[in-house]
Amino acid sequence: MNTPLIQLQPSDQYNQDLESNVHPQHWTNPTPTKPYQLVVIGAGTAGLVTAAGAAGLGARVALVERELMGGDCLNVGCVPSKGVIRAARVAAAVRDAEPFGVNVPEGSAVDFGKAMQRMRRLRAEISPNDSAQRFSEMGIDVYFGKGAFIDDSTLGVTASDGSVVELKYKKAVIASGARAAAPPIPGLDSVSYLTNENLFSSTELPKRFGVIGSGPIGSEMAQTFARFGSEVFLFERSEKLLPREDPDAAKVVQKHFEKDGIQMLFGAKDLKVSPAEGGAICVQMVQEGTPREVVVDQLLVAVGRAPNTDSLNLEAVDVKYDRSGVDVDDFLQTSNPRIFAAGDICSQYKFTHAADFQARIVIQNALFAVGPFGKKRASGLTIPWATYTSPEVAHVGLYEHDAKNEGIEIDTYTQHFSDVDRAILEGQQDGFVKVHTRRGTDKIIGATIVAENAGDMISEITLAMTAGLGLSKIGSTIHPYPTQAEAIRKLGDQYSRTRLTAFSKKILDLLRRMNVGN
Ligand SMILES: Cc1cc2nc3c(=O)[nH]c(=O)nc-3n(C[C@H](O)[C@H](O)[C@H](O)COP(=O)(O)OP(=O)(O)OC[C@H]3O[C@@H](n4cnc5c(N)ncnc54)[C@H](O)[C@@H]3O)c2cc1C
């Protein structure tokens, strides 16, 4: 019997269904007969896409997973987090229903257990896509066990019963991802805290919920638990929410966090943690030189990710790595030319869609490039990302400070949703679309959107950037009225107005007079 390291709780029908797909209890590992053309270590997004793509194109592939197929995204990341975020949005819609003329009877409340159960049901429903059965039906040899390199052409797979099988390979792909890592906070070991690995196993809503770190994961979960009814304390070392995002975007989200009643403790330095009465947790900090303490019932640590380089025995194959992960070049090749990497293990872009597209590059470069011919570069990818707070923040390309650091002169165009009819009608006027272009041109080099569905809207700009379409093309593209995406089209109009020079105005005047007189 194989035992996954991540324990999914509670052991209800949904989690049993999930496990039977992504780590079947009675799975028998195949017996290798001849060398694999590709072995893939890790069956998260990067590994699954690599294995499926390579097998689909005719390669003999082995896929090795030590825990749960689907990796972080399906089991303890994107899928469960977006599942609970949806429930929290419904709770907020009910809370905010009155101005819409919808009277919600007194006493409406969130049933946390039911919201979590819905998430578990949907996660289980999605899981056949990533299942061991589906991947073996694709002709891939799926092994459960810990993969570790033995030499330049052999990977050992240690199953949970201790048995080891040796896989011979021509090329290998490291897709072992990253996991939550405890930051050096004194006392953290003395309490039982949450990370993304056990948060989604919760069945009871904490009365007081502490979150360390206001990056994407911390912010998404702080807002979710506040909307569910917890008293939420968000500890952030810097002076603003979502420290890496556009500062104007972070301000809009902060206003909504205030409405959600989240207590944002910015500039929280020298954190210390200790057990408090009744199983609670005391968080001590220094804020603006003043010591302060807050007691919470559950504490989510949402800072620090560590690459899964442990146990791979990378030294045996001369693959260079450091604390941030495996070193790769622009072709996603490691210091060992036969070994590639994709996803969180090697990328600064720790997103599912980035892992997916890096995997496609690895398939091409590992299996179909001949010498320097046919190789694809990771730097050629335009990677957007989104944080699923309400409102969402989505971004692609350069931020203003990136452009400054790189010495690129820019023009910035901003369209606020307070001037977009659909946003007004939806009651979602807070937010904007901000686009940076190369100075004096309509070439888009970066954009940030703050809107309820910014994650969906950013794709229009990403497509424009990828296809080399400028703002004026967007401005001349008909968008249905009324939609929030019209905000993007309006930026095209803004750009066009800047092109209206004194000379072109004179020509227009002349043409008008020729047609309709003075
Ligand atoms: C709470 C949370 C929410 C997120 N939300 C989003 C989101 O909304 N959108 C988004 O794009 N991204 C999101 N992410 C990030 C996303 O989950 C990751 O970027 C993505 O999972 C990376 O995929 P991967 O294949 O590189 O790694 P992983 O998903 O981590 O998969 C790696 C796999 O390798 C296995 N493995 C490791 N070592 C070994 C070994 N020695 N032998 C065998 N197997 C091994 C692991 O068990 C794991 O299954 C979120 C992450 C978290 C934590």
Image (cartoon, grey):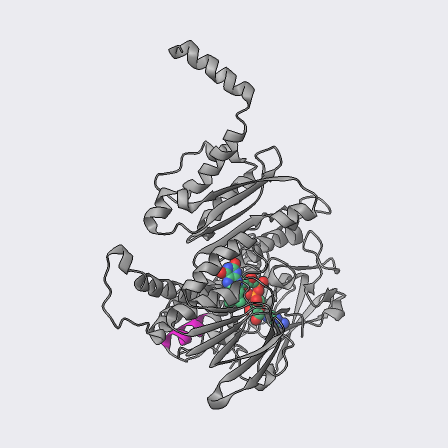
Image x and y of residue 190, in percent: 58, 86
**Horizontally, is 400 left or right of 112 in the view?**
right
Q: Is residue 292 above or below residue 389?
A: below
Foreground of the two, 255 or 3: 255
For image coordinates 52% across by 36% down, the residue present is 471
Please determine whether, in this image, residue 83 is positioned above or below residue 329: below
Query: What secondary structure predominates along the stretch shown in magenta?
Result: helix
- Quarter of the image containing the C terminus? top left
Percent coordinates x, y for residue 216 in the rendering: 53, 62
Is residue 144 inside the magenta stretch?
Answer: no
Residue 20 percent across, percent down from the top left? 44, 73
Query: Is residue 141 something one can see in this rendering?
Result: no
Q: Would you identify the image quadrant in which residue 229 lies? A: bottom left
- Check residue 17 for magenta coloring: yes
In this picture, which residue range is highlighted in magenta? 13-21
Could you say which is closer to the camera, residue 514 or residue 386? Answer: 514
213 vs 314, nearest the viewer: 213
Residue extending furthest toward the bottom: 277
